[in-house]
Image (spheres, grey):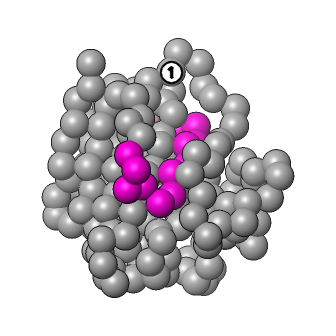
Amino acid sequence: MSIKMILSPPLYFSYSQFMVYDSAVTLPGCAWTDAHSAQGFARRKSAVCFNSILEFGHADVTATQGLYQPNKKYERVIAVPFTVESSKVIVEGPEEFDVGRTIALEAGNFRLVAAQYVVDDSQQKIDLYFEPRHEPLQSSEILVADELLDPPVPLVEIAEIARPHDSLAI
């Protein structure tokens, strides 16, 4: 059974990225390398920074606790291992702070799928799927790649914490 929720307010993504992280993570930003940018994400155990297709803009975000549902509209779909520790997941852009866009999930292991498509020059749609897993996944997967992605093989599975002096640009 799937539980679907529309998150509010709309997400302001910037610097071509948005973040999904457990509320227990105090520094959710990831330090991007060229390889991370090429694959469209940089991740840690409970924090993921995804490249947005557009550089700046707003996105309507829907979160589903349940299996990923393919859609012909999706231009980019990336699946990553994700661990929920605090039972509260936050979705934010890098220039947002404490906007209250949260998802309540039981602590545990998930396959987090981020599916995106462009609506217009400054608007995207982002669908997040949290698929519960008994054991933690070991690897990420690019399910749908747009022309901006050029992923390394194998994918880079871990990122360093972005420190305040690190650039937001990727």
Residue interval drawn in magenta: 71-83
* Outermost residue, top side: 134
Q: Which residue matches tag 1?
A: 133
Give the left or right position of residue 42, taking residue 102 as reference. Answer: right
Q: Quadrant of residue 161?
A: bottom right
Nearest to the observer: residue 113 or residue 18: 113
Nearest to the observer: residue 169 or residue 24: 169
Can the viewer see residue 97 in this picture? no
The residue depicted at 56 percent of the width and 51 percent of the height is: 144
**Is the residue marked by circle 1 packed among few (<14), some (14-19), or many (20+) residues within 10 Å?**
some
Q: Is residue 63 magenta?
A: no
Give the left or right position of residue 98, taking residue 141 as reference. Answer: left
Q: Magenta segment, principal secondary structure?
A: strand
The residue depicted at 47 percent of the width and 60 percent of the height is: 75
* Outermost residue, front side: 72
The secondary structure type at the circle numbered 1 is strand
The residue depicted at 57 percent of the width and 64 percent of the height is: 146
Check the picture and name the quadrant holding the C terminus. bottom right
Check the picture and name the quadrant holding the N terminus. top left
Amino acid type at mark 1:
Arg
Give the left or right position of residue 80, taking residue 92 as reference. Answer: right
The residue depicted at 30 percent of the width and 78 percent of the height is: 120
Q: Quadrant of residue 138?
A: top right
Percent of width and height locating residue 2? 27, 26
Percent of width and height locating residue 82? 53, 38
Q: Is residue 53 above or below residue 132?
A: below
